[in-house]
Image: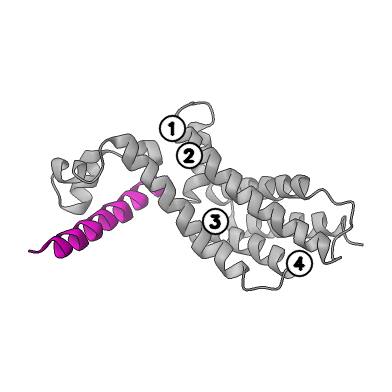
Amino acid sequence: MGPQAATTKGVATRELILDRAYAIACREGVEGLSIGALALATGMSKSGVFAHFGSREDLQLAVLDVGGQRFGEAVLIPALRKARGLARLRSIVAGWYDWVRDNHHGCLIMAAISEYDSRPGALQDRVVTLIHRWRSDTARAVQMTIDTGELRADTDALQLSFEIFGFALALHQDTRLFDPQQARAQADLAFDRLISTHLP
C-alpha cells in the first residue's frame, strides 16, 4: 500500500470513528463518550481508536467540531442562498428549529452547554467558541435585515440574536421533554412576535 492510499484509508477511518462518536454523543452526551464503547461501535480495538485521537478529550473536541460543521451545513449554508434581509434571517431560524426537530436527541452543541457551562477547560472553551459563532452569524443576519430597512434602524442586532438563541434553547429542551409539535409551534410564534415588535 502506497503512502497516498494509507493516508486516504486513515482519513476514512477517522471519519468513520467520528461519525459513530457523534451518534453516541447525541444519545449519551459528549461526556458519555468512551473509547471502549466507540471501539465496539466501530469494530476496532481501543488502541486502534487511540491511534487516531491522542486522548479522550481530543476525541470529544473533534466530535464538538463535527456538530458545529453539521449545523453549519444544514442551517447556515442553505440560508446564505436567500436574499439578504428578513428572508435570510427567517431561513436561519427555521433551519435552526428544523435541526432541533430532525435530530431525535436534540442538538449536540446545545446539549453540551449543560454539560460544560460550569466546567472550565478546553471542552467548555470549544462550546463557547461554537455558540459565539452561531450567535454572531445570527446577529450579522439581523444587521443585514436592519440595513435592508426590513427592521427598524434602532434594532439592537446583538440583543435580537440573544433572544433568538433563547428561543432555540427553549425549543431544544421542550422538544426532548414535552410535545415536539407544540414546542415548535410555540417557538415559531415567539419568533414571529419578536420580529413584529421591530418592524418599521
Q: Nearer the viewer, residue 60 or 183?
A: 60
Give the residue type at disc 3: Val
Numbered label attached to residue 126: 2
**Residue beneath the point at 15% across and 46% down:** 48
Q: Residues within 10 Å of mark 3 (few under 14, many from 20)?
A: many
Callout in the foreground (1, 3)? 1
- What kind of element bears circle 4? loop
Q: Nearer the viewer, residue 130 or 43?
A: 130
Q: Residues within 10 Å of mark 4 (few under 14, many from 20)?
A: some
Q: Which residues are magenta?
A: 1-27
Q: Is residue 141 left or right of residue 102?
A: right
Q: How many marks?
A: 4
Circle nearer the N terminus (2, 4): 4
Q: What residue sits right under mark 4 in the picture?
A: 85
Give the residue type at disc 1: Ala
Query: Quarter holding the C terminus?
Result: bottom right
- Magenta residues, dominant SS class: helix
**Where residue 149 appears, x then y in whole percent?**
86, 65
- What kind of element bears circle 2? helix
Cα distance in 3D space between marks 3 and 4:
23 Å
Q: What residue sits right under mark 1 in the picture?
A: 122
